Image: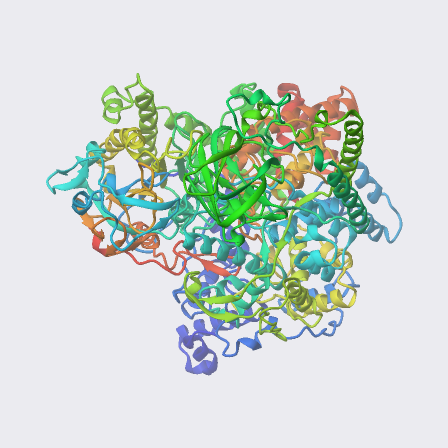
Amino acid sequence: MNRPSPTVAHPLLDRRRFLGQAGAGLGAIALTHLLARGGLLAATVSGKESLRPSIEPGRPYAPRTPHLNARAKNVLMIFCSGACSHLDTFDYKPELIRRHGQPLPGSEKLITFQGEQGALTQSPWIFRPRGQSGKMVSDLLPNLGALADDICFIHSMKGKTNTHGPGENFMSTGSALDGFPSLGAWVTYALGSSDQSLPAYVAIPDPRGKPQNSVNNWAPGFLPAAFQGTDFNTSQPVRNLQRPASLSPAADNATRDFLQQLNGRHAEHFPGDTELAARIASYELAARMQLTIPEVANISGEPAHVLKLYGADEGGSKIYETRAAYARNCILARRLIERGVRFVQLFNGAYQTGGEGFSNWDGHKDILNQYNVHGPVLDKPTAGLLLDLKQRGLLKDTLVVWCTEFGRMPTFQKGAQGRDHNPDGFTCWLAGAGVKAGFSHGATDDFGHHAVHDVVSVHDLHATILHLLGLDHERLTYYHNGLERRLTDVHGQVVSNILA
Amino acid sequence: MLPKVLRTAISVPSHRLGILGRVLRTIAHLARLAVSLCIPLALPLRAAEKSGSVPTRPAPEIAADSTDSKPQSHWAFKPVIQPAIPRPTPFLNQPAKAIDRFIQQSLQSAGLTPSAEADRVTLTRRLWLVLLGLPPTPEDVQEFVTNPRPDAFTQLVDKVLSNPSYGERWGRHWLDVVRFAESNGFETNRERTSAWRFRDYIIAAFNEDKPYDQFIREQIVGDALGIDVATGFLVGGPLDIVKSPDPVLTAQQRADELDDMVSTTGTAFLGLTLGCARCHSHKFDPISQKEYYSMTAVFSGVKHGERPLPPSATQAVEIAQLDATLVQLQRQLAKFIPPALPASPTPAVRASLRPAVNTIKNEEILNPISARSIRFTILAAHQGEPCIDELEVWAGDRNVALATNGTHVLASGTLPGYEIHRLEHINDGKQGNDRSWISSEPGRGWLQLELPRSERIDRIVWSRDRLGRFKDRLITQYRIEAAEQPGAWAVIASSEDREPFLDKPRMPHPYQFDLFSTAEAEQGRVWFAEFERVRKRRETAAKTPTTYSGSFQQPGLSHRLHRGDPMQKREAVPPGTLGIFSPLELASDEPEQRRRQQLAAWITNPANPLTARVLVNRIWQHHFGMGLVATSNDLGRNGAKPTHPELLDWLASEFVTRGWSIKRLHREILLSATWRQSSLPRTEALKIDGTCRLLWRFPPRRIEAEGIRDSILLAAGSLDSSRGGPSFFLHDVDRENVYHYHPKEDFDAPEFRRMVYAFKVRMEQDGIFGAFDCPDGSLVAPRRSISTTPLQALNLFNSRFILGQAERFANRLRTETGSGTADQIRRAWQITYSREPSPRESQDSEAFVVREGLPALCRALLNSNEFLFIP
């Protein structure tokens, strides 16, 4: 249900008219185009000409045209924070069962993130064939397993760091270092949004708290702040969104009107100044969001069968209550997608008191008991979300990306009952717009240690997501500190094998 | 470089061209003109860019140069030669200043004229906002407006330049350039509680007008100049403190630290993107990968960390004297330390118990015994897995436990995952938590030392943290055994004859005077009292502030890393500088400090073509919103070309000849007619140069995050203008293993200082002003984007901060003017806009105040464009 974007009320914001006033008009556009083709404009490192989106001041979220034919209109990214083990969920390794208890061949005295490794250890959960495709998915995630025919698995993911912070940075921004723009920021910078009364990019933190790397996951980096993800969930509203409680709506509106009058008079002295006009427009957009965000975040009107589908209706135990809270966030994600929000980032797992693995997927010490919490919390609500999107026809235009910062070792850590970090092989999956369904791409070795077949880097995954949105990852650039920066740096290849 | 079709269009005579050809030729001419004038060609895009929500890169002029066949011939690598000042142009305002002649020459060739001088109110506001980051008070404005002297503006400039708020504003610009922050970043994001000293140093440097070459030297090698705090520059960047036994990760982390130092140095002082040469030689600039690694070699002895500043010379003399006294007294007192008794079923054999264990140092005086193995069994500990930083076993004056003695150590288990807690630290002769061992189990564990030969041991010394910082993980119950033959263990000391450990650890003395004769005991007590007195004096004498700055040690060889991969070392690379200008190549074993001294000398050499150009361009940028070179951190071939190359060079050469004085440079710019122009738009000029790169007016712009907050506080009468010292917090902090920063929503007086003094957190922004394009210090930020977003509007319109300040502002108005609405409004206008309200404004405002109240008016004013823009 995409609402028509409201027309911009303020004449100062009329771009055509501004161009006319500035006198350069279409001539300059034509000239730019010619010069660009003549190679006078900056090229990216790849040698391709940059396609920097042209953004209207005051309407940073106006929809913009992609470079290519888009298969997907929006993205729902589900991020399992803490590094979800591929070996206990989606990557079935019979060899690990056969060699259970034996050392990992060729890796005597293997030192990984936390130290020495013990023996190869089979998953505590049994894998079973699921759906028509017979895809093997573990009993940890039966509901998601049941949807295997709708999912496109990538089993050959490869990261480059085995630390959570840099790993989450890498998955969310394409750089292990701090300070780079997130995928969602790049996407909204390129495409704006089809809805003009909600933020173009929403991050939904887990009910238990923010992910390990916190706001870096939805940061604008060096992109303008307009493209930062706005974070809220069903229990944590947008900061400063609400009208101050001490004021009546009428008084609040009167003050806004008075402010706009002050600004309007001031702008009369600066005809054609887009910056002033943009600030005037931002208060109008803010006023709209003040109404629409609470409306979209209020899921109380959802019917019982929907709450049940997601598992949002069950309580009574700590696990169920956490699950219900996450389920409400899943429903919120669907509502945002439905409204046309361009990029929704939904987190499962948080960094919080209690130590590693307690509230996220970092199962070092006791993976059985830790994942017996995280599995159920993730499974039913996420599966409900996928099903709901599918039933409402939203998967046609929405690309769902399930990811985590890296995978885990096929061995248990020496002296512990869990798995250490492993960036060399792990699983992500996609579903929905533009990707094959019931398909698996790439593979790790027999033990699930290294990605060996059709290896997909994080940059490749990013390039593919952009491609599905109709964006050429080599041409979508932003100039920062001496470089035409790209999401994919100087890397990345579209994984064409998974495109439908 | 025009496309071929356009070049053809120009060279072919008109009569041989069709209509299309003529159109093309017109376009081509326009294009050439535009390129030669550096007029931004993509006007619509640029206009949008300027407004913010868009890339701020001046698109077309960039990279026009990157097809040069000889990179060395790039303009910025050529020596700065002072150009002749152009002849005056016949424009309305007679240009007195060199700057105006350069600017007006370009205006003239583009068919533009400069704007008239702005009125005095505007000038005062502009001057205050640009130089101090705060609006002027009504009195400041009045003083200038009514000053009849012909040099009134010069006077005003000098007054403002000597205002200490200047350093707070321009120091903030520099802190952006050097990615200053007070937390580590990455996931743990721990605090750097003493990093504020570097900020204070920067602010003071601007206020004192420290010569820029000196300023550079101090930041690179301040430890050689007695200004250690300035080396906070080197280690100002993010630091990943999550250490792991994984060697790949460790090497990568170190390579990232060095890259941060090299890149920041290159970009801050030289305007070069050195980081681009980390994996391969630079694609645009003549910087080879080898040169990048010779720069890393310059910094390879630099480490992050909080450290005490060195004692001053007078302090050092006093400390040495006190130390000598302490050693003497300790010798005299030694006989009062009772021996440890082997544990027995009846510990009460001795009348008094030995002091309880403590975290700093525990001594076990033994009945001398021959031993080859010593076993230390931990039976209980205070808080968590027990820790020992050093375990010493003495045979006379030799610590035979040291690994260098050939002693092997075994343990029950070591807490995994920490570089700083390893078994080999137990007997490495190094003290402190960073070189310690922690048991893998809470409250338990054992250590066993295997000596290479039998030794007659008489004393065992162990501690939790000899440096005294950590109080947890202390062993409270233990047993120490020795064996000459395998398995033949005998208890030689234990906690049984010690006082029980109390939860609040204290540092008891080990002397037991009661066991001696009264006279001896009396003597001992006198010595001990003297010892304590001297020890306290020494403590005070040795106190120096700690600061987060560089720590230095002589590094080993540096290597080129193939594709930047720290696991793919290639040939060794000696320390050195870049080849673009008189390259230095130093010896591979060059002393650590000298490496940085040489680099600093090379950067500050007046003949270095980049240093002065980069700085004057930065200063220009913060006056006019955009530098003469738009890409202020990249003067390389991929950067923008200067709009006024001669002016840039003139400013750069003047800057160096006049002693690298930044305040003189400001004066030169401020007193120009160009700076004093009105900012009002003119339709004709907008047509030609819509983004005002040629400066036909003063370009107005929104003030930055810090300026907005500071201005609001000032207007409301809340601003606490105390300067310097530790930061105040805009966040509540959860100090767990990983630090969490929760933006505060309620603020009071402690948070009403200028925002430059707010604790600068990486990743987590302030809940209100972070959204105003505030960089978080993770990367260098040479120029802030100025975006406009609905979240900014929500924060500024709805936050409790703004409502609170609106109330305070309203109270201020009532106090200063009484209860008359008209007067209140008049005063409000003077404070926020530096002017009187128009009759219409008064009328509307009065009606509004009657309906909605004075605070509502204040809330609107504090949100308004006129208040938030540099006019």
Query: In which quadrant of the rendered view does residue B685 lie?
Result: bottom right
Query: Looking at the image, which is closer to me, B189 or B682?
Result: B189
Q: Reply above or below: B134 against A236.
A: below
Residue A61 showing in the rendered view: no
Query: Looking at the image, which is closer to me, B341 or B466?
Result: B341
x 49%, y 43%: residue: B421
Q: Please provide percent x and percent y for residue B377.
A: 47, 34
Specify whether B38 is left or right of B716: left
Q: Reply above or below: A120 against A374.
A: below
- In the rendered view of the protein, which quadrant contains the N terminus of chain A? top left
Q: Please provide percent x and percent y for residue B864.
A: 62, 36
Q: Reply above or below: A330 against B571.
A: above
Q: Please provide percent x and percent y for residue B12.
A: 45, 82
Specify whether A373 is left or right of A25: left
Q: Please provide percent x and percent y for residue B509.
A: 68, 30
Specify whether A188 is left or right of B802: left
Query: Looking at the image, which is closer to me, A450 or B753?
Result: A450
Residue B171 showing in the rendered view: yes
Specify whether A40 is left or right of B549: left
- Residue at the far top in the pictured view: A316
